[in-house]
Amino acid sequence: MQQKRIFLSPPHMTGKEMEYIQDAFESNWIAPLGPHVDAFEKEMADYVGCKGALALSSGTAALHLGLKLLGIQPGDTVFCSSLTFSATVNPVIYEGALPVFIDSDRETWNMSPSALWKAFEEAEKNGKLPKAVITVDLYGQSANYGPIIELCNSYNVPVLEDAAEALGATYGAKKCGTLGKLGVLSFNGNKIITTSGGGMLVSDDLDMLAKARFWATQARDPAPHYQHSEIGYNYRMSNILAATGRAQLEVIEERVAARRRIFDTYRNALGNIPGISFMPEASFGRTNRWLTVMLVDYQTGVTPADIMKALQEENVESRPVWKPMHLQPVFEKYAYFPHQEGETVSDELFANGICLPSGSSLTKDEQERIISIIRSLLRG
Ligand SMILES: Cc1ncc(COP(=O)(O)O)c(C=O)c1O
């Protein structure tokens, strides 16, 4: 008989969600607005340490409105981290703009400051600076914001931080999501906390958030009748889902601790096998270890695909590292700046990386099962 399936990053409910959902039903706020939406926004802004937050139907919607707030127009260029999920880039295309992809560095696996520097230099030479830079805090690790923000400030270009995977992670004393002009969070079912689907735009700029709120509710002008002077979107979060999110946010620190523990257990069990290594943690902050990512060198005689197959045979889900955007058929025509001349870090991470089950509800026994499958494969 096949063992119970182990998922990569399944939802982890606290038990308190139903109490808040019940309240939403009893008050009959069954709508994309209501008291739980307001409270979730306030509690999230307090948690990440910024002035305001806007609860939306997805992280992708937050990225889209973020780009609109930064004035992205058709034909503009937007610099964007290449090693990410396509949702980071798709809204650039929605607005008719052109992405320019930036490689990763080895310390963070996020936007390489040296590649970014080269991209800016080239853009300046060509007389066309980007309108925005989208950074990503991949797998819950902050990008190296010191040099990135300094560079962007020197060119007067705003940063949109895609912290979809990084709630609870930090850069120095700051929480991920608050490093740029605008930050994006996701509460998709696989994230560290979930509303089933949902996202947030966070910022200190309350005027920008007010404008995004207007667009997200169909751009209704303040008139007694339905009047529209701009194109709007139906992007707001439901009060029922916000109720779920509030219960989830109460345990964010426990969730970070659990994912970090899971990472440590994998690394302690497998990290001294020659050819096996794990995603580093940069010295400037705390990663939330949303997913544990392991690198498999060719000297092991085994590929990430071999490991994924062995896990799949035992009913365990795992995934390759995100395929970089500059390698995607839909995006390969856009410019790309590698970390160094002849050294493209994200290609290497994609070729050698594997994401292991990392959900905060993963039990010790389940993790032992995963570790022993990998160990026996590596022993040959
Ligand atoms: C890096 C990154 N950006 C954006 C998103 C999009 O978020 P959502 O699924 O909430 O639209 C995700 C995850 O889904 C993500 O991992």
Image (tube, rainbow, N blue to C red):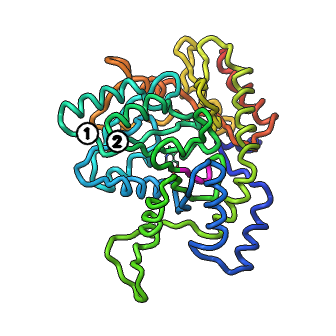
Nearer to the camera, 181 or 251: 181
- In the image, the segment drawn in magenta is 185-190
Is residue 279 something that shows in the picture?
Answer: no
Circle nearer the N terminus (1, 2):
1
Give the CA distance from mark 1 to mark 2.
Answer: 8 Å
Q: Is residue 45 left or right of residue 351?
A: right
Dot label at residue 97: none
Q: Position of residue 96 (x, y in %)?
A: 27, 54
Mark 1: amino acid: Leu
Is residue 359 something that shows in the picture?
Answer: yes
Q: Quadrant of residue 279?
A: top right
Dominant secondary-structure state across the stretch colored magenta: loop
Looking at the picture, does residue 155 appear above or below residue 17? above
Question: Which residue is under mark 2?
Answer: 157
Mark 2: amino acid: Val
Question: Which residue is under mark 1?
Answer: 129
